[in-house]
Amino acid sequence: MKVALLITKAEAGGAQSHVLELIDGIKGCHEVVFAVGDEGWLADQVRARGVSVTIIPDLVHPIRLAQDSRACRQIKQWLLREQPSLLHVHSSKAGLLGRIAARIIAVPSVFTAHGWAFTSGATMTRKLMTVPSEWLAARTGGDIICVSQYDRQLARRYAITSDTRLHVVWNGIGDTPERALLTSNPEPVITMVARFAAQKDHATLLRAIAMMGDVPCRLRLVGDGPLLSEAKALVFDLAIENQVEFMGSRTDVTTLLAHSDVFVLASHFEGLPISILEAMRAGLPVVASNVGGVSELVNEETGILVGQGDTAALAEALKRLLGNPALLSSMGAKGRERYEKDFRASTMIEKTLNVYETCLARNRRRK
């Protein structure tokens, strides 16, 4: 089988990390080719693995009709050149244009929705723009992988496609030897790994840290993005600059997690966050906003869920963990157990390949 993988942007992120895990998992037994809209982290990582990379120059995130039309033609030309057995697309724009191009030349397609753009917490304008485009893309006849049961139910609610074409495959990540050395820090370290963008809720976390008063702790914020300057300004407004470290984009996230005590993910909406999987793999307890598929990862044994935007609940959850080393340790251990059972990369690869086979079998029956 020859698999073509397509995504809109090459910047580091959850969907991009997922694509890399897929490539690592399937290139040993299947041929893989890859295309993306720009150069960047993911393109470099894929090339380093010896996989062919094609840049689709007109594939961009914003809606630009003339440019989108050109991108669709470029994707079609790439597919005609590569002649894959199946196209697997990721991210909304690549998902739409890629599936249209694949339908035109009769290439079976699978789309992974890394969290729907019309999820709870999204603006009404965003929903009005994205639901019709997702519905249209699904009419191309391909299968859809949802990364959580939450997202599958959301797709059913909006009648995106038939139940037989909707599959749930939880994200999975490869293992590393690094583990958190809980309570080894002289001052407890709270870490959040996330882009400074509208999806994430750094502001609520920062206000929670300020609300915790004299509770000793240090917050490390890993990531970059368009809202970074706003977060830095809020830190000074709250007078917590001595407690907060802005770490920037890092390639040593596993090491940073190993030197943390608690992982936090404050968000407005999510799919199934890979950053939480990384924390569970490291053996960290997790405090997270109860949005999207997060509750499928975090339960009362592995961490604490709080309401979206609930500053007081977030502060209380952090104080509860930091004040109870035994609870902190047990939740971290249970999170590690849950990772080993359900969220290894090998499990995700096996289930994804099963979806490929289902899609190809349906396509053969149609012929």
Image: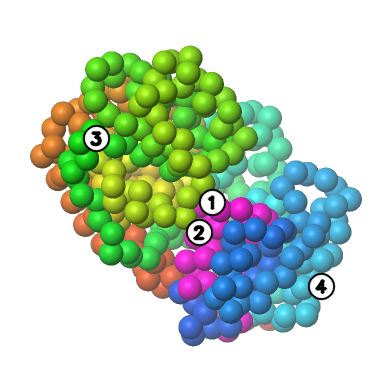
**In the figure, 367 relative to 127: above or below?**
below
**In the figure, 161 relative to 344: above or below?**
above
Q: Residue type at mark 1?
A: Gly
Q: Which mark, residue 13?
A: 1
Residue plotted at (59% across, 61% down): 42
Q: Residue furthest left?
A: 326
Residue 298 screen position, x and y as percent: 30, 43
First in sequence: mark 4 or mark 2? 2
Q: Which residue is mark 2?
A: 17
Question: What secondary structure is found at the residue carrying circle 1?
Answer: loop
Residue 309 screen position, x and y as percent: 43, 24
First in sequence: mark 3 or mark 4? 4
| Front position among marks 4 and 1 | 1
Bounds of the magenta span?
1-24
> Closest to the observer: 201 or 64?
201
Residue 169 screen position, x and y as percent: 43, 60
| Front position among marks 4 and 2 | 2
C-alpha span from label 3 to label 4: 54 Å
Question: What secondary structure is found at the residue carrying circle 4?
Answer: helix
Q: Which residue is mark 4?
A: 77
- Residue 32 shown left or right of residue 17 in the figure: right
Residues packed near mark 4 inside 10 Å, few (<14), some (14 to 19) or many (20 plus)? some
Q: Which residue is mark 3?
A: 188
First in sequence: mark 4 or mark 1? 1
